[in-house]
Image (cartoon, rainbow, N blue to C red):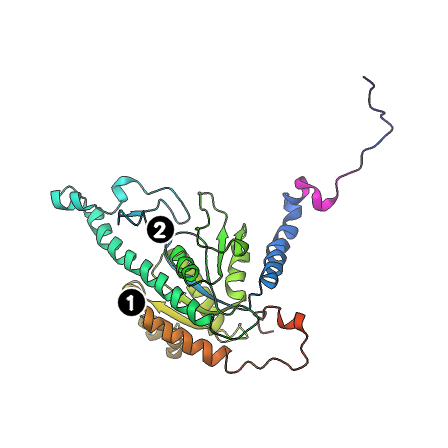
Amino acid sequence: MSEKDPSILEAAPLAYENPVFLNSPDGRVIRILSEYSEPLARFRRERIQDTVVFFGSARFRALDEASHELELLENTGSRQPAPEEEQPARRPELEEGTASELQRRRAEAAVEMAKYYEDARKLAYMLTEWSKTLKSRRHRFVVTSGGGPGIMEAANRGAKEAGGKTIGLNIKLPFEQAPNPYVTPSLNFEFHYFFMRKYWFAYLAKALVVFPGGFGTLDEMFELLTLAQTQKLAKKITVVVYGSAYWQSVLNLDVLVDKGAISPRDRDLFKFADTPEEAFELLRDGLTRNHLTTEIPPADADDDHRLRPEIAKTRR
């Protein structure tokens, strides 16, 4: 067996095929650009013009529909259930008096969250059915979620049941989060960087629906409200906050007004809704007023230009 000629130097790997470089700190800018360019190319290919984003709790999910039981997940984004002592009490435990106070409170909350799941599912169905009647060469007001369980799953599920495309902007977490099965496969995204995922939530969104949730829901809601408040979005966005009883017990915006932290008119940046029908009317009216009646495509616009999604520009 002949030895390798030491005078022959093997070709170095191409930089864009070098995993050591791409996964290093020096390759971070390439990874960030990839999470901008690849989704943009896919949205153009799938003819997505704009979206309606659904936010809400990822921790509650419906189990097998035949069992009608609910379980709480271990963490936002996890597929593993929370410890048994943190789970909502089941009927035998309630009847026998063996449930803890936490489990009893969780049982009451589970019923409430199950209702929100079904409401999100119905609202996404209604919105998708309506959007499919709009005459456009591109897909309008596509239901978009974070791609995970809970309210996200409900939104994607309702849109799919209505026969529409639906987007999932998933995030890679230390847990075991996987896309819910209702996301359109060609519109199933996985992000490493939270800020790039946030960008894509805002990029094409013409409306936002905020269902009851935790830290992540609050974060996304206030981020988009801040962009609207400071007029950093060169578009009007309709924000519907679903479940007034939940949110008014969690947030007291009147205190912010009384203390001068926000303007009284900032409360007009969103509207409360408590039924899918009420939320749908707010969405349909806002989307029609802001993004349908005012849209007149340029007569000389070429086909490629018309098929590109609008860019959510920020003001200079």
Of tags 1 and 2, which is closer to the observer? 2
User: Residue at 30% across / 62% down in the picture?
Assistant: 250
User: Residue at 61% across / 61% down in the picture?
Assistant: 45
Type of residue at label 2?
Arg
Position of residue 264 relative to residue 170, above or below, is below
Pick the front one: 192 or 121: 121
Q: Point out the stretch of residues depicted in magenta.
A: 11-21
Residue, far right:
7
The dot on residue 248 is: 1
Pick the front one: 254 or 112: 112
Image position, residue 274 (x, y; %): 29, 69
Residue, far left:
96
Image position, residue 150 (x, y; %): 37, 54
Query: In this figure, which residue is indicated by the disc labeled 2?
Result: 59
Magenta-span inclusion, residue 52:
no
Query: Label 1's element?
Result: helix
Question: Is 104 positioned to the left or the right of 236 in the image?
Answer: left
Placement of the C terminus among the 4 image quadrants: bottom right
Position of residue 3 relative to residue 236, above or below, is above
Sequence order check, earlier mark of 1 and 2: 2
Placement of the N terminus among the 4 image quadrants: top right
